[in-house]
Image (tube, helix red, strand yellow):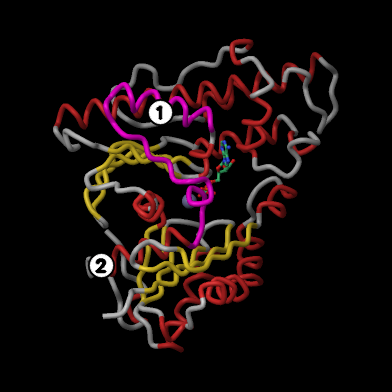
Amino acid sequence: SSKQLVLGIETSCDDTGAAVVDETGKILGEALHSQMEVHLKTGGIIPPVAQRLHRENIEHVVNEALLASGVTPHQLSAIATTVKPGLSLSLGVGLEYSLKLVDQYKKPFIPIHHMEAHALTARITEPVHFPFLVLLISGGHCLLAIARGVSDFLLLGQSLDEAPGETFDKVARHLSLKNHEECSTMSGGQALEHLAQQGEQQKFKLTLPLARSLDCNFSFSGLRSHADGIIAQKKKEEGLKEGQIVSCAADIAAAVQHTVALHIFKRTHRAILFCQREGLLPERDAFLVVSGGVASNQYIRKVLQILSEATGLTLCCPPPRLCTDNGIMIAWNGIERLREQLGVLYNTEGVGYEPK
Ligand code: KG4
Ligand code: ZN
């Protein structure tokens, strides 16, 4: 039979992404439109604005991915689209557009779970076999799970409040980093990482969250309020107006980054010890996959590299462009599901289908 080709479409948050991937994981074409610049201006994502921008861009993004791939819609094996979780207004745009294509070209439709797609992305480029441990850290998600199969995940822990990317974004906003000339076009996380390199992490000591809790959950809001308090205090001391940057911003950025990294380290360490004690991971060649936008943070990567080496796991972080939201991971999840004949719908009646 000829090669499987899947078109993937992602619109769950603020990125409109599309890609065509084949069964070997080769990326034949991709396109991505980020709304970050607009949302940076408003200080956060406003769902109806995100929806409008997805609507304005989806056709162009899908066509660009198809054109780059040299694949015509008729040649596709299936169309895969994120159906959850995410902002419902945003998800709706991708779903509606996909179903139009599904109808027009009579293609199978594969509903994709955004988190599962993040988790499986590593398998495009690395021989990561099941079961493996996965840590998802981004602006919208924070979880630790064991991936036992393409559609079989065991949740070990998640954030009790916000996601680490959200914490970075909020602290960056509070520090007015968009007014910092070197950081003006960066995401909050990127800006904090950049600034932290010029700061001293030990100048401010932030409390490590959930230090005594015996599970694998996360919490970031406490350390964020702690940092916010310090920033407010310093602003007052320095007599700053709204939008001005405190002199010790780099030290605060370094302390926040360090404490977030240490918290992630401790919780992931617990998860690894639990998995090893219960025999939930292979005894040899077990993988720790780290994905999501925050996984592109070099400081956090280094900490996780040390942890992996110490516990005998192989760390696998997909390259940054695969770690953040994109159409490639959705297309790839489509390929993986197609291979195992999982949740493929042959008409448009199954919109309410819930991936496991
Ligand atoms: O995966 P992603 O593109 O979107 C979702 O949240 O699903 O992740 C975006 C998040 C943002 O919160 C951003 O601040 C954070 O990832 N981020 C980073 C870095 N680059 C992006 N956080 C820390 N360090 C970075 N270098
Ligand atoms: Zn995501």
* Amino acid type, callout 1: Gln
Q: Circle 1 sits on which residue? A: 305
Query: Which region shows up in magenta?
Result: 298-327
* Amino acid type, callout 2: Arg
Describe the element under mark 1 as helix, strand or loop: helix
CB of mark 2 near ligand 2 (< 8 Å): no
In-front residue for pair 152/121: 121
Describe the element under mark 2 as helix, strand or loop: helix
Instruction: Using the numbered discs, state the Cα–Cα distance from disc 1 to disc 2 in whole angstroms.
Output: 32 Å
When the figure is inspected, residue 236 is found, relative to residue 278, above or below; the finding is above
When the figure is inspected, residue 154 is found, relative to residue 66, above or below; the finding is above
Q: Where is residue 201 in the image (x, y as percent from the top left)?
A: 60, 16
When the figure is inspected, residue 231 is found, relative to residue 323, above or below; the finding is above
Q: Where is residue 107 in the image (x, y as percent from the top left)?
A: 37, 83
Q: Position of residue 28 (x, y in %)?
A: 48, 68
Q: Say few, some or many: other residues with alpha carbon within 10 Å of mark 2 (under 14 / 14 to 19 / 20 or more).
A: few
Measuring 35% from the left and 17% from the top, which residue is drawn there? 212
Q: Left or right of 56: which side holds 162?
A: left
Measuring 29% from the left and 25% from the top, which residue is drawn there? 270
When the figure is inspected, residue 151 is found, relative to residue 177, above or below; the finding is below
Q: Is 316 in the magenta?
A: yes
Quadrant containing the C terminus in the rendered view:
bottom left
Q: Say few, some or many: other residues with alpha carbon within 10 Å of mark 1 (under 14 / 14 to 19 / 20 or more).
A: some
Quadrant containing the N terminus in the rendered view:
bottom left
Q: Circle 2 sits on which residue? A: 339
CB of mark 1 near ligand 1 (< 8 Å): no
In-front residue for pair 333/115: 333
Query: What kind of secondary structure does the magenta stretch mostly adopt?
Result: helix
Measuring 41% from the left and 31% from the top, which residue is drawn there? 218
